[in-house]
Image (cartoon, coloured by chain):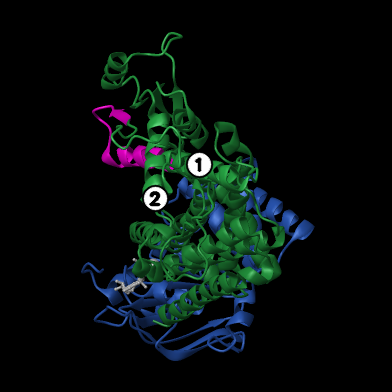
Amino acid sequence: MEKASIIDIKHLTKCYKNADEAAVKDLTLSVNKGDIFGLLGPNGAGKTTTISILCNQISADEGEVMIEGHDLNSESDLIKKIIGVVPQDIALYPKLTAYENLKFFGNMYGLRGKVLKERITSSVSDFGLEKKLHSKVGTFSGGMKRRINLIAGILHKPNILFLDEPTVGIDVQSKNVIIEHLQQLNASEGTTIVYTSHLMEEAERFCTHIAIIDMGKVVTVGEPSALIKAYPGCSNLEDIFLLLTGRSLRD
Amino acid sequence: MWLKFKASTIKELLLLMRDRAGLAMLFLMPMLLIFIMSLLQESTLKKLEERHTPVLIVNFDNDSLGINIVNGLRSAGFFEIHELIDGKQPSLEELKKLVNYGKYRVGIIVKEGASEALRNQIRCEIQQMFPAEEGDLFSPPPDPDKPYPEIDIYFDPITQPTFKHAVSSALNEFTYAVEAKMIMGIYAQMLNDIVGIEINRSGNFKNMINLNEQYAGNRKKIIVPNAVQHNVPAWTIFAMFFIVIPLAGNIIKERESGMSLRLRTMPGSNLAVIFGKANVYFMVGILQAVFMLLIGVFVLPMVGMPALELGSSILALLLVTISISLAASGYGILIGTISTSQEQSSIFGSISVVILAAIGGIWIPTFMMSEKMNIVSKLSPLNWGLDAYYDIFLRNADVSDILIYILPLFLFALSCILASWLYNRYKTSN
Ligand SMILES: Nc1ncnc2c1ncn2[C@@H]1O[C@H](COP(=O)(O)OP(=O)(O)OP(=O)(O)O)[C@@H](O)[C@H]1O
Ligand SMILES: [Mg+2]
């Protein structure tokens, strides 16, 4: 009945050097192949920290992570080839054009020549940016930058795509383009998507599975519809979220 | 790996080419420095040695002493000799006035009969050396009561004592030469009279002793470059090391913008990315060197300075340039890695390069430094590069001669990169 898990996180703990408290505490979680997995939680919950560990940006203090059967610590280079990462902050070169940026990132994944060129042009037109292909990214609006930021993470057709708040600070149209494209990627290529957000409505609509984490710990995990049924008195994810994480300010 | 390196290089090249201001700084700054510093040093040198000081000589003597002084000063080259004012010989009063007003820095008067008086004195001396019973050696006999020959020198009132001294010693030299010549002449005449041998008197008695001028110190060989030979390589190296600032700034910018975190999620070693970046600055360093050396060879002569001679080994020149650029790139990587902010890196980078330049003999050549400072200067990689260039330009050094400079530069680059790598590993494990 269970689908094969593609990411297995066990007892993950990370405490930043100058922090009093661990950002991620004994976190255990698994993501199945083909899921659109939402990692939800209030500000400072540890979402970015968790994703950063999964995609090799920082190292964990304790715990074990297996991705597609490879150990994150010892086989990171294998893992890097099959994952795509879209960071929370836009990481592009503003002085380079969209095309130059994407070509650079494609090269970083070993793509080159005609294949790369075709992938760039098709992705860019999927996201409605073909006219801007040869303009400098620095001149783009926030929404356009986000879309290029996303394309840079999927050019190499990763098996697993990590996105950290890909829909923050953009209009409904851009957000819909992004969500639709990700759903399409999930359906056609079978890409597993792990995504963080604190937008409950979006997550409820978009995710096949979610985990709510708070203060570095998983507070609940499951399919959105099943969770709503499981918590009496809750009619949507936001109700569950508030129920589990409280109403007080975080961060 | 190769693709990653290539892509980083291309990306960095594009970024650099779009940074017009940064690029201008990398090429214009050293060019200006070379011009300004060479011109400044060249003109002070000229002031010291080559500027022709106007000298007014009135030769009332018109005999060997007067003529020798005029010709001697003229051929010495530092002076501009004038004998006539408006076509005629000035009087003593006129000369004093002209010198006092600064029209001439020096006025020299060789008094009438000075040569004759000198001859008389010499004869008196010779006569005294012989026993009295020999009788008169000369006819008519010399008159011991006749006055000594005199030369009066008037100086412009603002003249520096060192300059006065230089003029008096020049005059002394010429008068001694005349004296020696006369003595020899008189003896020759006497020999001729006594023994009856005709002696050729046109012998030249100048400069029988060579003065070897050297700088004190026990350095094995001292090379003293001219303004161009010093300034062109010195500021080239300085500029090449200045790439530390944009390179380090670039590394930090990439880190602050989250770009290096993103790059860390990508397969392959991150060293390829860093090396791609450093590669561009390395090439910029080479270009800077080519550009500056060409200025030394072709442009400086156009503004009246000596042309830079590149020595005999282009391969040695290339190897030195490569190793300097490599050392600078390595240092840039290190500064970029250990600094925590743009400000910190540009302050630390520029101050450290300026200090290394100062102790390395970029500003003030090491041959003008004290013995102690000369040892300290050996600590600066800029000095290794400068010494290597000196050796190539001034001594026609070849590849084997400059290995002692290239090797440390390579090692320096290597240890910078190693230190950065270790530091990075330590950082990311936290
Ligand atoms: N580089 C860092 N050094 C020290 N502490 C950090 C660092 N990054 C994050 N933290 C701390 O770790 C905790 C978790 O942060 P994290 O960024 O993972 O939260 P998040 O869930 O992504 O929040 P947000 O929704 O605001 O993005 C927070 O308390 C934060 O202050
Ligand atoms: Mg976050």
Q: Residue furthest front?
A: B133
Tell which chain the image draws in green.
B
How many other residues sit within 10 Å of disc 2, few (<14), some (14-19) or many (≥20)? few
Q: Could you tell me the amino acid type at mark 1?
A: Ile
Please state the chain letter of the residue tagged with numbered disc 1 in the rendered image: B
Find out whether residue B153 is within the magenta segment: yes
Q: Please give the label number shown on residue B186.
A: 1
Residue B312 in the image, given as x and y percentages of width and height: 70, 57
Q: Position of residue B26 (x, y in %)?
A: 51, 47
Residue at x-position 75% and y-position 55%: A118
- Any part of residue A118 in sight: yes
Q: Nearer the viewer, residue B7 or B19?
A: B19
The residues bearing labels 2 and 1 have C-alpha atoms spaced at a distance of 20 Å
Using a 10 Å C-alpha cutoff, classify the residue at mark 1 as few (fewer than 14 neighbours), some (14 to 19) or many (20 or more): some
Viewport quadrant of the C terminus of chain A: bottom left
Tell me what hue chain A is rendered in: blue
Point out the stretch of residues depicted in magenta: B151-173
B170 drawn magenta = yes
Q: Position of residue B232 (x, y in %)?
A: 53, 49
Quadrant of the displayed image that contains ligand 1: bottom left
Residue drawn at 61 percent across, 63 percent down: B320
Outermost residue, left side: A248
Query: Does residue A101 appear anywhere in the picture?
Result: no
- Residue under pointer 2: B133
Residue A198, quarter of the rendered image? bottom left
Q: Check disc 2 and give the amino acid type.
A: Glu
